Image (cartoon, rainbow, N blue to C red):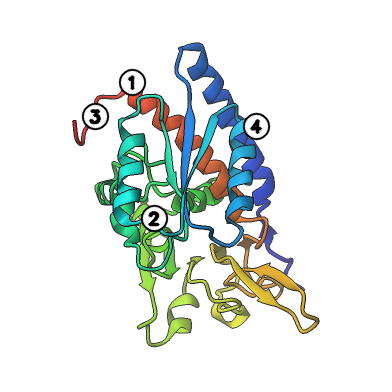
Amino acid sequence: MVKPEANVIDGTALSLRIRKEAAAQVQDLGREGIRVSLDAVMVGDPPAGEIYARSQRNRCHEARMDYRLHTLGRDATERDIRAKIRELNENPGVTGILLNMPLPDGIDTPAMQYCIDPYKDVEGVNPSNIGLLFYDNPIIAPCTALAVMEVLKEAHIDPRGLEAVVVGQGAVAGKPVSLFLLQQMATVTCCHIATRDLKEHTRRADLLVVAVGKPGLITADHVKPGAIVIDVGINSVVDSDGKRRIVGDVAFDEVKRVAGVITPVPGGVGPITVAILLRSAADAARNQHKTPRRLGS
């Protein structure tokens, strides 16, 4: 008997649903006199920076959020960036702040993220939010990690008791996902560059989350039959004909014949993360007006 191919999660459809929910939340807040905004800071002229900013603006306008882009020159110093973020922190008309990546070489990225008010940190990258995640009580959690958890909800999967393996331990995805899964009572193994035998770990995973930025790292022989495979990787590769395309960390075409559930790239975790950003922006505005602060003044 031939095994059916995996259930492929449609991240684009799920993203649309979350964006509609965020728009409804923005509308509800508006009726209470609360405007939701997203202020993005872009430093220098990163590749595709203007395209990314235009996409942010369009998504915000679809959700009826205010969007403002603040552009600093490529010669901007850390002091300049701190001053701009401080200005936005102190402006009560700003409810969400996003620091566009990448920053120019020589800029201490974590230090700049640390400057963002945790209550306006819509991406959940401030160390205060990362730290509070350890206690299962973040003000705003990292968007990519939340997107992974949305995939599990969409597939009606309860992590409790599952053998979960997270490949990649970055601060944006791998570590936060590991914490979320631990909090939901999965048994979690964290793999990274120093892991000696990756297949030994991934082959026993009921749930496999991959977030390393290495195209096609996970092949069919890495995966337990029927496993849930969530691919967070986004990589640009050039084919033999010179055409560029986006792929994940998982060899999708072969792994989908083994897995029970899988996310594609593109069209998987990526668009869900963008939608989560909008939802987090609405949550940030609500929290600033309705929830007593637990941090800062």
**Residue topped by disc 1:** 290
- Whole-angstrom CA distance, mark 2 to mark 3, is 32 Å
Neighbourhood count class around disc 4 (C-alpha, 10 Å): few under 14, some 14–19, many 20 upward: few
Residue 126 visible in image: no
**Residue topped by disc 4:** 62
> Mark 4 is on which residue type?
Glu
**Residue topped by disc 2:** 76
* Mark 1 or 2, closer to the camera: 2
- Whole-angstrom CA distance, mark 4 to mark 1, is 25 Å
The quadrant in which the C terminus is found is top left
Residue 130 location (% of width, % of height):
30, 51
Q: In the image, what residue occupies the spot 50% across and 36% down? A: 279
> Mark 3 is on which residue type?
Arg
> Mark 1 is on which residue type?
Lys
Of mark 4 and mark 1, the one earlier in the sequence is 4
**Residue topped by disc 3:** 293
* Mark 4 or 3, closer to the camera: 4
Identity of the residue furthest to the bottom in this view: 196
Q: Is residue 112 above or below residue 118?
A: below
Proximity of marks 3 and 1: CB atoms separated by less than 8 Å: no
Numbered disc 2: secondary structure = loop
Numbered disc 4: secondary structure = helix
Residue 185, located in which quarter of the rendered image?
Answer: bottom left
Residue 16 location (% of width, % of height):
66, 39
